[in-house]
Image (tube, coloured by chain):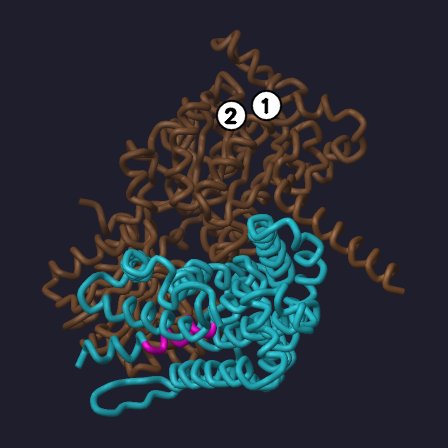
Chain colours: A cyan, B brown
Amino acid sequence: MLLLQFFVSGVATGCFLILATIGFSLTRRVEGFLNIAHAELLGVSAFTTWWLNSHHGWHVLAAAVAAIAFTALVGLGIARVVYDPIRHRGPAVLLITSTGVAFVIGGALHGLIGTGIRTLDIGLAHRYEAFGLRVTSHQLIVVGLAAAVSVSLALFLNRTRTGLAIRAMAVNPELAASRGVNLSATSRATWLLSSGLAGLAGVMLAVLATLTTDLAFAQILQILAVAILAGLGSLYAVILSGLLVGVAMDVSAYWIPAGYRPLVAFAVVIVVLLFRPAGLAGTRDA
Amino acid sequence: MNTTKSICLRLFAAVFALSLVAAACGDDDDDEQPATDATETPSEPAATGDAEPTDDEPAEPADDAEPADDMAEPADDEPSEPAEPADVGEITVGVLVPLTGELGEFGKIVADAIEFGVDEINAAGGTRCGTIRTVVADTGGDAETGIREATNMIESEGAVAVMGPTSGVMVALVDLAHREEVVIMSPYAGTINLNELGGNFVYRTVSSDLGDGAASGLWLSSRGYESVSFLIQNEESTISPAEVARAEVLEAGIEITDFIVYNPGQPSYQAELTTVLANNPDAIFLAGGQESGVTVIKEAVAGGFEGEWLFTADLAVPEIFDAVGAELINDKAFVEFADADPSLPEFISFEERYDKAGDPFAPNSFDMITLVALSLEAADSCDGAGINSTIRGVAHSDGTKVSTFAEGRDILASGGTINYEGASGPLVFDESGTVSGAYTIQQAINGEWVNVEFYPASTFDG
């Protein structure tokens, strides 16, 4: 039963990783580089939620919606101002620049927020028990959101014109352009979507965690682990990868000290990449 | 229209790029203009007007930059000759604290208390080596940053002492202190690593974590618990006291259901809490920082834990009640931390003078700078080696008891010896440069921390 409890916890951990990584992977596929600043966008959203909720008394849902929208615009703004002008210099330059952007966002957050801890003005999570297993309302929200985001994103990418354009641009931008896809508009839609997803993950970070200005960037290693494990092939692989890493990390605590959980995440990545060098989903396709 | 838009975008990009460069180069300022560095706090014998030159003479930075070196030279050449009390410029000490990150609140407390001590010393006329100038830098709690900033303070700013590092940074600075012959001191670095490494150029005005662990263990053993779980943040400063406490608790015959070392910076600690909640102990000993600690407390209570808590010093702040929700921990939570003996007249006097009385580690920080200043008075040279050679004798001797810089300086000037009785307690450095300490246990009552037990240093003798 204890092992099952670790599994339940792992599913919730994995679902948070899915939320945190799916936007990162979308940017990676469409824009072609690892946007290290993505983790700091979680911080932008988390602190915006905190500011509206704790400082201005907004209901957490209203604060969350505003924070997600604001984060999406911040992400788009950064893309337009910083990344677009240097896009032609290639993914390595973009990656290094995104690291700089992460430092700028982190510094700005620290300058605005200051030291110490921050928490949302929300109640304690409720506890539900069934079959000897325990789950909290916060864990259920994370799992529900991850499922909703996964389904919605799948529908968006497969059923809408913009979604299909994003997929086409991810596979072959030149061919997509020749077929009438507006690359600039598609890129903007991608940044809005991926940054909005970072915003959603940031809201959940604020709900679950005790915020410090360092906390968001602390998630980047696990985001990278999930994204690398997923590979370039498909966004659906991010879902599988997130669950795999989350469950492996938490279930491992049944046998080995919990302090080794991050190590387990990367051990899973290494083992999988030994057998599938291109990640769970293989190479870039649809 | 498009052209204008494009130019605007490019301008914006340029400004952004410049900000990136500025962020990357932020701390690399040369030492030519110390008085204008934003991280520096010029010494303030405020009422005397001696501080003015640093503000009023930006055109002559070289003169300002030299005094520390000038101080050091005569000492090297003429070590046996007592220093001249004449008109000398400034002597620099570094204040190396975490102003950002999780321990930022504590770093600010330490920096403020040091500054208060500097103000008192400079108002009394300064040391024979000059008025004290502080150079402040933020480590963020990071050892690598600490080494870089300390090196800058010593080699560029001429600091003769560096005060305020946290445990991990202190350990990282030991080699630098020995190599540069500069004293490093901390008011809160309890790590047991310094029990081996400290003692020569490395001092602390707080007791070792072994003492914190012993006090925690003593408290846990006295509560009548049958089982206790240990949740320990993966940091040197939390693991060492927890191990001491564990030994104490085991010796008392109490079952330890879990001893879990966890990593901070996680959105959730449910995995770590799974076995703890399954074992349902009478109490949880939580040795963690504020970020992880608050989340652990909330998740444990949400998970059904109804027992008592014992926290370590990081959670001994009022903000915890807002962050956690006072109703969750009222009457059930206790916190243990190294503390000054509130009955000491030196402590009472300090609390009356200092307008931020009650700040944890403020007396220890004040004692640090006062000891450095008195050591300079007693030393043959105005450098780290001079401080290192006299600090033990100033802190503890058969000489006249003093509790302020001015008293000590006058006695030393007349050829006497002094025994500095600190605001944080008697400061007797052992071989490792560590003082013995006293500890307070507070309980969460009606949204405040209230003293419920005090363990004087004598509790742990033998």
Residue B349 visible (yes or no):
no
Tag 2 subunit: B
Discs 1 and 2 carry the same chain letter: yes
Mark 1 vs mark 2, CA separation in Å: 7 Å
Is residue B102 covered in magenta? no
Viewport quadrant of the N terminus of chain B? bottom right
Which residue corresponds to the image point at 77% horizontal and 56% vertical from the top-left?
B12
In the picture, the disc for residue B146 is none
Question: A171 or B61: nearer the eye?
Answer: A171
In the picture, the disc for residue B129 is 1
Element on which disc 1 rests: loop
Residue A59 left/right relative to B44: left
Magenta segment boundaries in residue numbering:
A11-19
Element on which disc 2 rests: helix
Viewport quadrant of the C terminus of chain B? top left
Question: B114 or A122: nearer the eye?
Answer: A122
Tag 1 subunit: B
Q: Amino acid at mark 2?
A: Leu
Circle 1 residues within 10 Å: few <14, some 14–19, many ≥20: many
Which residue corresponds to the image point at 70% horizontal and 65% vertical from the top-left?
A77
| B250 is higher (above) or lower (below) than A51 | above
Residue B230 in picture, x, y percent from top left: 24, 64
Dot 2 corresponds to which residue? B376
